[in-house]
Amino acid sequence: MNSPLIARVMPCARPDGKRCPPPDCALGQSPMNGRTIDIAIAGGGLAGGLIALALRRARPDLRVALVEAGPTLGGNHRWSWFASDLDAEGTALLRELHQTRWDGYSVRFPGHARDLATPYHSLASADFDAGLRRLLPEGTVHCDRPIAALDARGIDLADGERVEARCVIDCRGIERAPQLQGGWQVFMGRRLRTARPHGIERPVIMDAAVEQHGAYRFVYTLPLSGDELFVEDTYYADSPLLDRTVLAGRIDRYCEARGWDGERLDHETGVLPVVTGGDFAAFQAAHRTPGVAVAGARGGFVHPLTSYTLPFAAATAIAIAREADLPGERLAAMMEARARAHWRRTRFYRQLGRMLFGAGSPDERYKVFGRFYRLPEPLIERFYAARSTPGDRARVLCGKPPVPVLGAIRSLVTPGAPLSREAA
């Protein structure tokens, strides 16, 4: 069903009569003279960028504005995923963006190491930004445009400009979610160029054979080229505290022990929620703007235990592109329904998260993943894609538990800590 067009976009006026350059052009002054903005996307991170890309592929006739507060799309991040996380459409969508691919990966735990054959992919935010600027139509990308407010008919920018559109999608991130419960995934990553070839051929996505430091700690290593590595120190922790000095020192020691000396190219840090429960209806209400569709982590589209977002961002983008003619109110309702269905489907992973954080000593949390990585590879693939079958769930839970039984039972009936950085 088509919606009436809400507002006209005025042509970009310059004294010399030339078109404004797309990145610097005011949103209300599009170089696409006289056309209406059909869909305005607030937030140029992974979710917003993939929605814009999916719309370009499926509906190149639509006028889309992708509005980002920061200087680039995607911020300073690296997204990684297993090939099995995506269906054919999702794979095709991501294929247009430059990425690094490996035919398999490894894991390491105390007394146990394993190589797996599932292909693994990684996408740097710099390549995400460059790819979207290359692929999206002129005038779509608008960075350095902080958002003051939004509603069902447009976006108010911090500089006072109003961007009117038929439909608005909110893909901005969130800093806190006190309506939900759980723990935190805290990490620091470093990209470095080694002084000599490092000899690493495939990713090590979990090296938990390291000192745990009061959390489930593992080091994640990606060989980006023969002399370039990405090394990330990650913690499943009770607190969102991220001490950059401490984590940097631990990465130093990890690299030194392996002879990886060389030039530090850049780094990233992050604190992600690991959701174990809560009131999802209240979470939706807290992030709802009437008539505005919500996607990405703000919409609840995450893997509760791994904090992965990419598979769900791709699926959401494709779903929105299919329904791009819906009025904003109906698209908002569709997205809320999808989010509720996702919450129901991922209940099993929240239960596992409660056991991970609540059943045993933090220094022994690695045993949960160590046992998990002895299971069949297809089960592991379905787990990361949040598509575990009833048989998979039974297989994960059966046998001798890696955590105390009474602790596991107690964790399932005890409310978790609210996901509020102020309260942690």
Image (cartoon, rainbow, N blue to C red):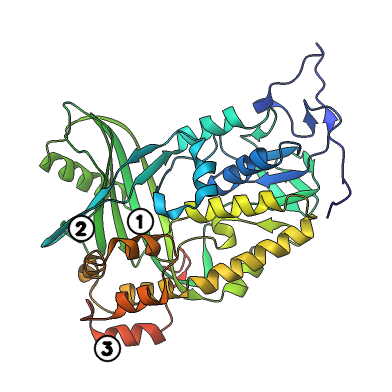
Circle nearer the N terminus (1, 3): 1
Q: How many marks?
A: 3
Quadrant in the picture for residue 22: top right
Secondary structure under tag 2 reads loop
Circle nearer the N terminus (3, 2): 2
Q: List the residue tagged with mark 2.
A: 208
Q: List the residue tagged with mark 3.
A: 406
Q: CA distance from mark 1 to mark 3?
A: 28 Å
Dot 3 alpha-carbon crowd within 10 angstroms: few under 14, some 14 to 19, many 20 or more: few
- Seen at 72% across and 44% down, the residue is 40
Residue 416 seen from this side: yes
Question: Residue 212 at x, y = what percent?
Answer: 20, 61
- 132 left or right of 327 in image: left
Q: Nearer the viewer, mark 1 or mark 3?
A: 3
Residue 291 seen from this side: no
Q: CA distance from mark 1 to mark 2?
A: 15 Å
> What's the amino acid at mark 3?
Leu
> Which quadrant of the figure contains the C terminus?
bottom left
**Which numbered tag is attached to residue 186?**
1
- In the displayed structure, 371 sits above or below 38; it is below
Q: Nearer the viewer, mark 1 or mark 2?
A: 2
> Which quadrant of the figure contains the N terminus?
bottom right
> What's the amino acid at mark 1?
Val
- In the displayed structure, 122 sits above or below 127; it is below
Question: Residue 390 at x, y = what percent?
Answer: 41, 77
- CB under 8 Å between callouts 1 and 3? no
Question: Residue 91 at x, y = what percent?
Answer: 49, 45
- Seen at 23% across and 80% down, the residue is 401
- Give 327 or 17, whichever is nearer the viewer: 327
